[in-house]
Amino acid sequence: MSNIRKPNGHQNWVLTYYIDGERQPVISLPTKSKTIADRMKGKIDDLIDCKKAGEKPNSELAKWLLKIPDSLREVLEERGLIERQIRLTIQTAVAAYIDSKKASWKPKTYNRRLNENKWFVEYFKPETRLETIDRQAAVQFLNWLKDVKNLSPTHINSIMKWGMYIFKYASLCGAYSLPNPFINVRVPNTVQRTKQYISIEYTEKLIEACPTVQWRTAVAMLRYGGMRPEEILLAEWDGVDWEAGTFTFRSPKTEHHEGKGQRTIPLFPRLREAFEEMRMAAEMETGIILPQYILSTDKPGNGWDSKRQSIADGKNGSLCELSDFIVKAKLDNPGSVPTNMRGSCSTDLKRKYPEYAVDAWLGHTKAIARRHYDVVTADLFEQAANADDFNSDSVRDSVRDCSRFWSLNGNGKNVNDAKNFPQTLENTGFLQKESPSCNYLQQGLIPPAGLEPVTR
């Protein structure tokens, strides 16, 4: 089918092959070794057989094709022995992925992705081909992030996901056909934020320390409405339905999901009070609910309009001045105030309303709520510690009587000692007098040797 030879004056071997009896142009093999040339000849013969049979190369051939020089691959593509593939480098793959997502990413997401890509490109180098990166290389990259760069588990987790997205996008584009090397790589567990419950009493003291009605309303929207900071900034009076008792507002965080651009929550009594106070003070019922400067990434002075535009574009604001009010009210610092207030709102509501309803009102899934918001409060520990569910004398006596009864029956001794046992069970609540199934036991219709019929 084919043969190799080394022409006079040439250092490398060349391969001559035939298809349907017709001689094809020679292929220059990039090697001086006769042994390596023979191996390449065998692989190319297999490719010729695949072409004649109309089949794709098997996994062994596919792995070999990944290791051959680009010059040989290009020749094989030109001769039609293998399919022509788009060969992506790290630089081209990243650029294509970012270009495909840039329109849907919010500015904050875009900046975070660029930060993740910085580490990815620094380690693998822009000119590296995707198919040269295997699972072992991904694991080494993970260890480099941990041991050399000393990044946090949360940061490492995010960077490893970025790598997975790059290869997934290349696979969807048909430029990468191997398994994603970043899948199933064990990444360090992320350190979760410390969740703290902010009580109603704490919230009311903080509201009293707020200097303006705008700040008092903002705190009420956080704690009693479970709203995010960017939702507070964009909320309008048109969303308040006083008669129906509902409040509808825009949700920038989730608006890129279909049907998640806005959310409706009940107009909870304490939230209604805050809105009524705000409406009386501002003497307006249209436009933005909080028209004055409240949210900022810096101290006041940037201007409300510019910050409003940045929030509308997807950037989160932070209630930075709340820390000053907390100090003024001589309260303990609860950490991330907006997030903990939102979580405390979720915790309180789930004590009264179905979990699915609360998750829908606050705009998150059950998994997200349990991971980031729901808190086991101190009063539940106190309630459980003082409960007598496991300390009741009647329960202990009943359990002891049950053990004694079944022990006697099981051993076949002193069965008559248990003749009053049904009455004991009835007195302790284990048997219902009206239960037909229990009457069999009470009336002696079941043989004392056990529940099964006696066999002879």
Image (tube, rainbow, N blue to C red):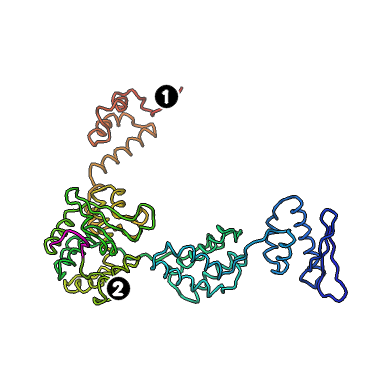
The question of residue 289 being in magenta is answered with yes
Question: Horizontally, is 222 left or right of 111 in the view?
Answer: left
Q: Residue at x 56, y 73 (%)?
A: 126
Residue 228 sits in quarter: bottom left
What quarter of the picture does the N terminus occupy?
bottom right
Rendering coords of residue 170 (x, y %):
56, 61
Question: Horizontally, is 149 left or right of 285 in the view?
Answer: right
> Which residues fall within the magenta stretch?
283-290
The amino acid at mark 2 is: Thr
The amino acid at mark 1 is: Val
Residue 114 sits in quarter: bottom left
Rendering coords of residue 40 (x, y %):
77, 64
Q: Report helix, strand or loop for mark 1.
A: loop
Location of residue 111 with respect to 245 vertically, above or below: below
Question: Horizontally, is 445 left or right of 136 in the view?
Answer: left
Rendering coords of residue 95 (x, y %):
52, 68
Circle 1 Cα neighbour tier, 10 Å, few/some/many (<14 / 14–19 / ≥20): few
**Disc number at residue 454?**
1
Tell me the residue that label 2 is attached to. Answer: 297
